[in-house]
Image (spheres, rainbow, N blue to C red):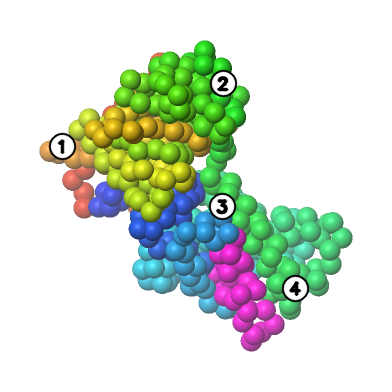
């Protein structure tokens, strides 16, 4: 199996494009004053614009707003904008022509595209070109993208494989797979709803505009696609750990994480503790104790929670900056300091007053397959570290790979990237002047790897004014 991961222009910050919503999830979890405004753009035609029975526009009964409500319920502390750059009556060719001028200036963190209803009268080859153009523009700007198959219409039949709208829905599914971007399959959900006995008239305001029920159906699919982009997410809490004061190693039921502590796991109630120290110290770690977390090759740590904690927590084992964010707790904020020379993260956590404090990693890929070592210290007396839970995620078992990002570095006349390779996989660095399908050339290769290790791929001729890169990852 071979997976091509498209990269960015040499002139932009370098990152491997990831088909996920992990980064935006981390941003939306942040609380004041660490948070920022997050922008989500819906680009398309009259449906995301909010047209119901033309010329009536009902934005608060349309899927962009309904999706925003779902996100706000999930992230109560988030500052979130949902922006529609859609135009009623427009098709993908027109939408692609104004994509860089109308969509990208909003600095979106996530983009959704919905044009297929109005693409039916355009040759499908031209439609494909337009959609690929928008995908390329989003990838070049390093913005996650979700393609939407169309909602239904009275003059369309999703059960007919030859129907023009079905053909365009199939094209969008193919593009999502080939370009490694996310998909919200509204057409499949629409057909399932009709097959369950729901009449199409009850989902439409007019021939090709959904009503509130149709938009609600679409919004649910869009929200589920967002959750799917988070990957397989797990959580391990105090009730999962042994608390017998004699066991110092614990592996999660899915075998993705193994915890090892200096003494043995203990704790009381909903605390994950270490048995060293007197009295209530069984609920916490101190300067004489350490905690190690070993992650499987397809696992990554996304964050953890602490309570009744005041400590300096030093973590080693990252492959790069994890992008740590610390939530406000007990009216106080902590600080996260990344030391790039030693690849260490120092979390300075003030007393939380018994409130849960959450640490999240915007770049959890930096933990994939690693062993993280946690040690604790604080100059002032009475400090302690008491864990409540750990969160983690897994990549697709079909590939064994997790999304990741790395910086492109320059050393004289060489451009190179260094990242954690996984055992059994082969990595090829490819370059192209245009990102056209047949224009890619392999310039460096590493693998198949006998063991997981840091690898470097390089380009010794990066002199062109602009070029694109991608990494091809092959499994046996």
Q: Is mark 1 on a helix, strand or loop?
A: strand
Q: Is 251 included in the stretch rendered in magenta?
A: no
Q: Residue 226 carries which label?
A: 3
Mark 3 and mark 2 residues within 8 Å of each other at the beta carbon: no
* Label 4 neighbour load within 10 Å: few <14, some 14-19, many 20+: many
Q: Residue at x 36, y 21 (%)?
A: 289
State how far apart marks 2 and 4 are (Cα): 55 Å
- Residue 60 in the magenta stretch? The answer is yes
How far apart, in angstroms, are the residues tagged by discs 1 and 4? Answer: 59 Å
Q: Give the camera-side residue of 158 and 314.
A: 314
Sequence-first disc among 1 and 4: 4
Residue 148 in view (yes/no): no
Separation of disc 3 and disc 4 at Cα?
24 Å
Residue 17 at x, y = what percent?
41, 46
Residue on which the image places disc 2: 242
Q: Position of residue 159 (x, y in %)?
A: 79, 57
**Residue at the outermost right position:** 197
* Image position of 445 (left or right of 390): left
Q: Name the residue under label 4.
A: 204
Q: Is residue 171 above or below residue 206?
A: above
**Which residue was labeled with disc 1?**
411
Which quadrant of the figure has residue 287? top left
- Residue drawn where x is 46% and y is 52% of the image: 29
* First along the sequence among labels 1 and 2: 2
How packed is label 1: few (under 14 Cα within 10 Å), some, or many (20 or more)? few
Mark 3 crowdedness (10 Å alpha carbons): few <14, some 14-19, many ≥20: many
The earlier-in-sequence mark between 3 and 4 is: 4
Q: Which of 203 and 340 is in front in this view?
A: 340
Comparing marks 3 and 2, which lies closer to the viewer?
Answer: 2
Q: Residue furthest top?
A: 246
Q: Which residue is drawn at 59% across and 27% down?
A: 240
Query: What span is in magenta?
Result: 44-70
């Amino acid at each position: 199996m071979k997976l091509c991961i498209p990269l960015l222009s040499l002139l932009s910050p370098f990152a491997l494009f990831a088909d996920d919503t992990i980064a935006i999830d981390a941003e939306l979890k942040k609380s004041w004053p660490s948070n920022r405004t997050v922008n989500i753009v819906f680009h398309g035609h009259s449906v995301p614009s909010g047209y119901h029975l033309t010329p009536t526009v009902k934005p608060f009964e349309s899927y962009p707003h309904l999706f925003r409500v779902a996100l706000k319920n999930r992230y109560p502390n988030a500052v979130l904008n949902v922006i529609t750059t859609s135009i009623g009556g427009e098709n993908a060719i027109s939408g692609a022509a104004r994509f860089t001028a109308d969509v990208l200036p909003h600095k979106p963190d996530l983009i959704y595209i919905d044009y297929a209803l109005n693409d039916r009268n355009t040759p499908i080859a031209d439609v494909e070109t337009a959609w690929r153009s928008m995908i390329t523009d989003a990838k070049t700007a390093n913005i996650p993208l979700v393609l939407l198959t169309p909602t239904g219409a009275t003059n369309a039949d999703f059960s007919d494989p030859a129907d023009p709208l079905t053909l365009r829905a199939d094209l969008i599914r193919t593009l999502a797979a080939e370009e490694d971007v996310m998909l919200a399959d509204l057409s499949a959900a629409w057909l399932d709803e009709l097959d369950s006995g729901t009449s199409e008239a009850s989902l439409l305001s007019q021939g090709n505009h959904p009503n509130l029920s149709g938009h609600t159906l679409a919004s649910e699919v869009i929200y589920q696609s967002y959750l799917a982009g988070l990957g397989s997410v797990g959580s391990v809490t105090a009730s999962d750990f042994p608390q017998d004061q004699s066991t110092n190693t614990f592996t999660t039921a899915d075998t993705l994480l193994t915890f090892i502590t200096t003494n043995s796991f203990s704790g009381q109630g909903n605390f994950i503790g270490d048995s060293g120290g007197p009295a209530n110290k069984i609920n916490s770690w101190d300067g004489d104790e350490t905690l190690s977390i070993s992650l499987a090759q397809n696992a990554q740590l996304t964050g953890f929670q602490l309570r009744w904690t005041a400590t300096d927590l030093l973590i080693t084992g990252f492959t790069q900056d994890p992008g740590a964010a610390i939530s406000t707790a007990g009216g106080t904020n902590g600080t996260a300091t990344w030391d790039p020379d030693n690849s260490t993260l120092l979390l300075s956590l003030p007393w939380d007053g018994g409130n849960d404090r959450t640490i999240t990693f915007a770049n959890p890929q930096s933990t994939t397959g690693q062993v993280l070592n946690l040690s604790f210290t604080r100059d002032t007396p009475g400090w302690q570290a008491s864990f409540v839970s750990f969160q983690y995620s897994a990549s697709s078992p079909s590939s064994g790979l997790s999304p990741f990002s790395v910086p492109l570095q320059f050393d004289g006349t060489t451009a190179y990237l260094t990242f954690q390779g996984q055992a059994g996989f082969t990595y090829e660095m490819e370059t192209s002047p245009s990102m056209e399908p047949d224009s890619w050339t392999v310039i460096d290769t590493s693998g198949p790897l006998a063991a997981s290790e840091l690898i470097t791929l390089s380009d010794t001729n990066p002199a062109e004014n602009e070029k694109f890169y991608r990494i091809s990852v092959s499994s046996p």
